[in-house]
Image: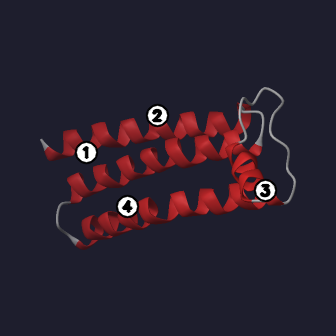
């Protein structure tokens, strides 16, 4: 039962990773690409790691997958925020179809 459930989680994770990779290729600017990378790839990779944990149980490999999963959940949002803020400060323009630039509006309000 655990191996079947683990394989289901791994399959879901592969699907999310595929969507994240397609988003990296298809989306128009760095900000949208970071959205795809952070959301889809984090959810997909965590699902794969959880599937490995379900298949391995409380062994060394299973505990390492839980540790990697928690590390990924803690660091991926921070990394995406730092990259997007750095890109914005470096002057990387948003896609022309973007509706709002909240960071620029917040900086104008501070000045």
Q: Residue at x 33, y 64 (%)?
A: 65
Label 4 belongs to which residue? 69
Precedes in sequence: disc 1 or disc 3: 1
| Residue placed furthest toward the left | 1
The residues bearing labels 1 and 4 have C-alpha atoms spaced at a distance of: 15 Å
Horizontal and vertical percent position of residue 41: 52, 46
Q: Nearer the viewer, residue 25 or 79?
A: 79
The residues bearing labels 1 and 3 have C-alpha atoms spaced at a distance of: 38 Å
Relative to residue 97, is residue 38 drawn left or right? Answer: left
Q: Residue at x 60, y 43 (%)?
A: 35
Asked if the residue at tag 2 contacts the one at tag 4, i.e. Cβ–Cβ closer than 8 Å, the answer is no
Indicate which label's residue lies in the foreground, 4 or 2.
4
Label 2 belongs to which residue? 15
Indicate which label's residue lies in the foreground, 1 or 4.
4
Asked if the residue at tag 4 contacts the one at tag 1, i.e. Cβ–Cβ closer than 8 Å, the answer is no
Instruction: Give the color scheme: rainbow, by chain, secondary structure or one colour.
Output: secondary structure
Q: Quadrant of the N terminus?
A: top left
Q: Is residue 103 above or below residue 63?
A: above
Horizontal and vertical percent position of residue 67: 34, 69
The residues bearing labels 4 and 3 have C-alpha atoms spaced at a distance of: 27 Å
The residues bearing labels 3 and 2 have C-alpha atoms spaced at a distance of: 29 Å
Q: Say what secondary structure mark 3 lies in.
A: helix
């Amino acid at each position: 039962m655990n191996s079947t459930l683990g394989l289901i989680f791994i399959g879901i994770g592969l699907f999310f990773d595929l969507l994240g990779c397609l988003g990296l290729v298809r989306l128009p600017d760095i900000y949208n690409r970071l959205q795809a990378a952070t959301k889809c790839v984090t959810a997909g990779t965590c699902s794969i790691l959880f599937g490995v944990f379900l298949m391995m149980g409380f062994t060394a490999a299973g505990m390492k997958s839980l540790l990697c999963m928690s590390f990924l959940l803690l660091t991926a949002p921070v990394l995406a925020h730092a990259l997007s803020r750095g890109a914005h400060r470096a002057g990387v323009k948003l896609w022309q179809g973007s509706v709002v630039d909240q960071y620029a509006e917040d900086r104008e309000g501070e000045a």
